[in-house]
Image (cartoon, helix red, strand yellow):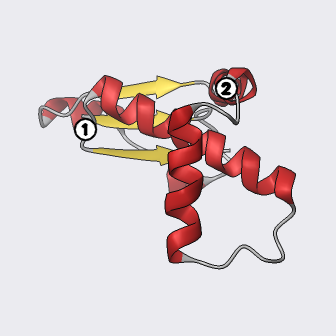
Amino acid sequence: MVGAIGARTKAFKTMRIDELALQRNGITMEVVDLAEAFASVKALSSSNPACTAKAKRLMQYTTWGQTPETAFDNLVRLVVVLDRLFDEWKKDCMGVRC
């Protein structure tokens, strides 16, 4: 199963997907509006255990020294939301379109 976060926009041709071709090959496509994902990010507290664990994990494999704290916090919460969607939908892959 394939997941897409964001609108089906024509301007970004690199992210266009032929959903009918996927379906003919037994692949299901689920789409969530980007605004819905952002609303979930906004509703998620930075102190949530999943967020603190994800922040720790992200800190372990790259440098964030010049990243503003609010930007890092937003990224952490977005990754937690995307991870949840991935697990909830039991996806094989997922893309984000903006």
Name the residue at 65% across, 31% down.
Answer: 34
Name the residue at 31% across, 38% down.
Answer: 2
Q: Nearer the viewer, residue 93 or 78?
A: 78
How crowded is the residue under tag 2: few (<14 C-alpha within 10 Å), some, or many (20+)?
Answer: some
Query: x, y percentage for residue 95?
Result: 46, 47
Query: Quarter of the image holding residue 37?
Result: top right
Q: Nearer the viewer, residue 22 or 31?
A: 31
* Secondary structure state at the residue bearing disc 2: loop
Left or right of 92: which side holds 33? right
Please name the residue that numbered disc 2 is placed on.
44
Query: x, y percentage for residue 41?
Result: 68, 30
Left or right of 68: which side holds 80? left
The residue mark sitting in front, 2 or 1, is 2
Q: Nearer the viewer, residue 65 or 11?
A: 65
* Secondary structure state at the residue bearing disc 1: helix
Query: x, y percentage for residue 88?
Result: 33, 24
Q: Quadrant of the N terminus?
A: top left
Q: Amino acid at mark 1?
A: Ala
Residue 3, relative to residue 68: is it above or below?
above
Give the number of the disc on residue 97.
none
Query: Quarter of the image holding residue 26?
Result: top left
- First in sequence, mark 2 or 1: give its number: 1
Residue 21 showing in the rendered view: yes
Give the number of the disc on residue 21.
1
Query: x, y percentage for residue 12?
Result: 64, 52
